[in-house]
Image (tube, grey):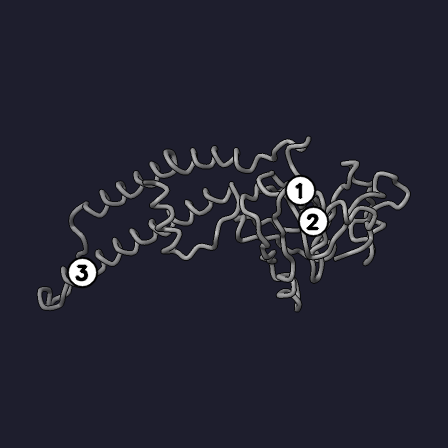
């Protein structure tokens, strides 16, 4: 029943296809907020129409400057305040507490794919640790147009790292931890199908995670106006594929750390 309602509201609101496990709570929040707005709209519209009818000029040809004589409005305000307290205590706080389960970063030891994403005007750079599972040492002083991650060429651990441009590959049904940063201005990493949005801020590396559940090719958008070429940020894509295909792709890129697709 609940799933049927979800599918119905999902279709009525025209929400984009969902391709990540943790995205459904986001959809439910959107659905509940829309219903709340509908209730408020109908309630206030009904009150407005009642006011027009109750205090129409035909029934009250002469203005009454005394104002309201009863305490009904005060009682209504108390009821509204009580409802807000109930929503806060019984709904908002429990949901916020539960949200910690969604935002908690999963373990990285074999249970998740870890990548680094650096946004720039106007593209998305992505880095993988390679077969050794260890990222090479980085230094912000080494960041250049050809080395957006500032990888030290003297660190053996970075020799098999993989860097790509505008096309990120990840395996399906496995958590992905993405460390988001920026090389120049503030960007925002957004994948609608995963309900994931994370600001990319220069000088900071902020983790976000998602678990893709459907194979496909999904567009990456920048949710922060970042310059005249802002729309070009949508040329990035996130490819979800089987573990076998992902391993084959990553293997084909190993040793090409300074090359881009």
Label pair 3/1, CB-CB below 8 angstroms: no
Q: Is residue 172 left or right of residue 143?
A: left
For the residues carrying marks 2 and 1, which lies nearer the camera in this image? Answer: 1
Of 179 and 134, which appears nearest the observer?
134
Residue 48 falls left or right of residue 3: left
Quickly name the residue at label 2.
Answer: 117
Q: Which quadrant: the N terminus?
A: top left
* Mark 2 or mark 1: whose residue is earlier in sequence: 2
Which residue is identified by label 3?
65
What's the mark number on residue 244?
A: 1
Q: SS class of the residue under badge 3?
A: loop
Q: Which mark is residue 40?
A: none
Residue at the spot 27% in from the left edge and 45% down from the top edge:
77
Residues under numbered marks 3 and 2 in contact, where contact means CB atoms less than 8 Å apart: no
| Residue drawn at point x = 17 percent, y = 56 percent | 66
Q: CA distance from mark 2 to mark 1?
A: 23 Å
Front label number (3 vs 2): 2
Q: CA distance from mark 3 to mark 2?
A: 65 Å
SS for tag 2?
strand
Q: Position of residue 172 (x, y in %)?
A: 59, 43
């Amino acid at each position: 029943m609940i799933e049927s309602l979800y599918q119905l509201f999902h279709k009525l609101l025209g929400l984009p296809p969902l391709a990540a496990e943790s995205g459904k709570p986001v959809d439910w929040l959107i659905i509940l907020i829309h219903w709340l707005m509908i209730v408020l709209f109908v309630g206030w519209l009904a009150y407005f129409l009642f006011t027009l009818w109750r205090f129409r000029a035909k029934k009250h040809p002469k203005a009454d400057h005394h104002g309201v004589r009863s305490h009904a409005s005060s009682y209504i305000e108390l009821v509204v305040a009580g409802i807000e307290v109930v929503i806060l205590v019984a709904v908002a706080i429990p949901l916020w507490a539960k949200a910690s389960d969604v935002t908690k970063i999963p373990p990285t030891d074999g249970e998740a794919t870890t990548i680094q994403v650096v946004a720039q005007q106007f593209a998305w750079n992505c880095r993988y640790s390679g077969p050794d599972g260890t990222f090479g040492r980085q230094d912000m002083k080494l960041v250049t147009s050809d080395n957006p991650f500032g990888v030290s060429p003297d660190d053996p651990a970075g020799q098999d790292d993989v860097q790509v441009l505008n096309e990120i590959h990840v395996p399906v049904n496995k958590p992905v931890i993405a460390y988001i940063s920026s090389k120049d201005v503030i960007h925002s990493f957004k994948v609608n199908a995963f309900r994931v949005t994370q600001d990319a801020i220069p000088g900071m590396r902020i983790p976000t995670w998602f678990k893709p559940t459907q194979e496909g090719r999904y567009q990456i958008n920048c949710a922060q106006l970042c310059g005249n070429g802002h729309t070009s940020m949508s040329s990035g894509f996130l490819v979800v594929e089987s573990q076998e295909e992902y391993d084959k792709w990553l293997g084909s890129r190993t040793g090409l750390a300074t090359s881009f697709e």
